[in-house]
Image (spheres, rainbow, N blue to C red):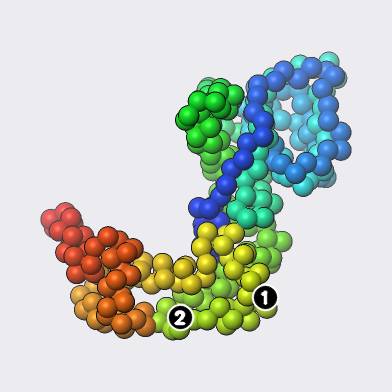
Amino acid sequence: MQREALGSYISNLQLHISEAAFFTCTSSWYHMDVLSDFNRLYYFLGDGGHVRIGDEELYPKRGQLVVLPAGTMLSLRTLEGRVFSKFFCHFNARAGEQELFQLLDTPSCVDVLDEDATTRRFGEFVHHYHQGTRLTSMLRAKLLLQELLCEFLEQGGGVSLRQTAASGPLDKISQVLAYLDHHLSDDVRLDQLAELVHFHPNYLIRLFKSVTGCSPIQYLNQRRMEKAKQWMLATDISVSEAAERIGSSLYQFSKMFKQHTGVSPSDYRKMMRDQRPPQ
């Protein structure tokens, strides 16, 4: 359920870009003991840089992406006598109060698959960011940043939670998600969920929304409809039995199902089965 909670978090992720540019680092370039409230993404086009992230020392090479997480003590400088170029971006990526790279356990530095393609993508990203007065430019900039972040995560071996995150708020939300999945047919109350994780109900709602984008009861109804869609597609149970399985009346179930899918349960079953390729 932690992975499901993380998936919900990712789906509600909000990106805010505060700066993006191409920059040539001369021997006088440095930032020492910096603590920022934004993340930094660097793409190195040459060698000669030194980066310290907390206690970690890096000497990035050409064709490497580096993420420097928000809230971490950083030092950056050019090695003596060296000059190199890089693209960079300052950004926040969060759902609610949770910053993405404070939750994820990833390497700090990865090699890209195709240097030329990543150079073009970062260049387009910077271009669109600085053309922000055009109607679609910021949308394109955010899309390109998402692609760069996906490349970083994929080349870094995928996504996993930091141990501190797994035992923190996201773990609490995972417990609530698991409880809801096992009580689809029950009349679940907010105070029950809050007691489960020892939170005040109002705090639970705020935290739950920051991760999933909806309230616990809205999430429960969504899961009920997702299950109902699976039953309509993969089984021959009646609509009445599907309604009973989620603890609903036939009328209320049919109404919710149509709001969720745009069609009635019976029509959904027929429509989806008609689309199946012949055996």
Q: Is residue 185 something one can see in this rendering? A: yes
Q: Which residue is mark 1?
A: 200
**Left or right of residue 174, residue 47 in this image:** right
> Image point 63% across, 81% down: which residue?
195
Q: Is residue 3 something one can see in this rendering? A: no
Count the marks.
2
Of residues 81 and 37, the one nearer the viewer is 37
> Image point 33% across, 70% down: which residue?
256
Packing grade of label 2 (10 A; few <14, some 14-19, many >=20) is some
Of residues 187 and 85, the one nearer the viewer is 187
Q: Which residue is mark 2?
A: 183
| Pointer 2 or 1: first along the chain | 2
Of residues 5 and 256, the one nearer the viewer is 256
Write down the quadrant of residue 39 in the picture.
top right
Of marks 2 and 1, the one in the foreground: 1
Residue 133 image point, x, y percent: 54, 26
Q: Tag 2, which secondary structure?
A: loop
Residue at the limit of the structure toward the left, as seen here: 278
**Left or right of residue 64, residue 151 in this image:** left
Q: Tag 1, which secondary structure?
A: loop
Residue type, mark 1 in image: His
> Image point 56% across, 50% down: which residue?
13
Inter-mark Cα distance, 2 to 1: 21 Å
Quarter of the image with the C terminus is bottom left
Write down the quadrant of residue 62 in the picture.
top right
Residue type, mark 2 in image: His
Q: Is residue 180 above or below residue 50?
A: below
Q: Is residue 221 above or below residue 47?
A: below
